[in-house]
Image (cartoon, helix red, strand yellow):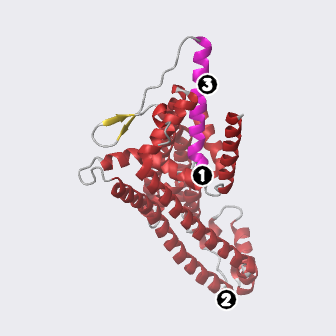
Amino acid sequence: MEIKARLIGGLILVLLGGWVLHSYIPLLAWAVVLAITTWPVYMRLLVSKELHGKVTWGAVGLTLLIGTIILAPIGYGLHRLINEAQMMGQFLNDAQNLGIPAPAWLDTIPMIGQAAKDFWIDNLGSAEAAKESLHWLGTGSAVTYTKDFAGQLVHSFFSFLMILLVLFFIYQHGQGLSRQVLASSRKLFGDTGVRYVLHATTAVRGTVNGMVLIGLSKGLLLGIGYAFAGLSHPAMLGALTGIFAMIPFAAKIIFGACSLVLVAQGHAGPAAGLFIYGMVLTMITDNYVRPALIGGAVKLPFLWTLLGIFAGMESLGFLGLFLGPTLMAVLMSIWRDWIIDIDNPSVKIISPKPEIQIDDEPLATPSATEFDDGQ
């Protein structure tokens, strides 16, 4: 009865803790993903001559570096967005006072060129028509949308600060946390539990590395395409594409918009070439290269890697982009162990004991019994 009461009481406390922290669980998960991905960098930082053994300074330095890497391009993009919004506001104000003349390239469109030009003149050619067509921009809904966007932006900023704070503490106490997680897994599930934890961390690290590598590569290649197409600021567009390219197929938004800009400027040929180039590049990287990079880290088949990426995003949003393949990797490990147990019931799967690097010498992971005193 005492054991049952302890289990029931512990379960109730866990559920209550989860209910209290439910809004912060995604932030904690993001911090864990970042910590697992950058842990090798952190360990190399600790063994360097400048920060040898200085855990706090190493955690502070790497946390600030990650925050700068993420916030710097976002801040620059928001600055450019504000400037472009001001220019767009001036353009719309002039359009409502003077109208928007039809572009010359409309006449060059085969078959529908004249009809398109007449439609443009009827709806935007005069001040009255433009004011009627653009009237919705001055309504309260646009103001409400702007306020909502600003509120979401402030909320996202403070959420990111919370992620960095949690990440700092994970760096600072990561050695003890990793030992406790491995010891708990061994005590609950045996050596196979340790192996599942190691597979999960490998899957997270492989997924993040694959996303970042694909994003940087696609941003670089499409940046070259922007330069050849004659777009202004190809480097900035390439960097923006690289950020969006970390999400499968999201880069289409950027190079598709750039293609429309080229069409509006009367460069239909470069626009078509850029769009086709971007579509082919997206199809190759998102359907073949990305799943191969992510699945190769944990020997996860192509199909399950792809399903983990898209199903994870559908269920958990952007966080599921990393947790989906991780879950698939653990499930695949369980499945392989099950098959081995069916084929060879006498074979015992033994997981290697991981080593945790602190200074110059590796420390073997303690057994579960060493944590019975609550340390």
Q: CA distance from mark 3 to mark 1?
A: 27 Å
**Amino acid type, mark 2:** Asn
Q: Please tell me whether residue 89 belongs to the stretch shown in magenta.
A: no
Q: CA distance from mark 3 to mark 2?
A: 68 Å
Taking the spot 52% from the left edge, 55% from the top edge, the residue there is: 274
Q: CA distance from mark 1 to mark 2?
A: 43 Å
- Residue sitting nearer the eye, 327 or 177: 177
- Is the residue 87 above or below the residue 209 in the image? below
**How many circles with numbers are drawn on the protein?**
3
**Amino acid type, mark 3:** Trp
Residue on which the image places disc 3: 335
Along the horizontal axis of the image, is 21 left or right of 50? right
Residue on which the image places disc 2: 97
**Amino acid type, mark 1:** Phe
Residue on which the image places disc 1: 318
Mark toward the start of the polypeptide (3 vs 1): 1
Tell me residue 147's x, y (percent): 66, 76
Taking the spot 52% from the left edge, 43% from the top edge, the residue there is: 285
Residue range (magenta): 319-344
Mark 1, secondary structure of its residue: helix
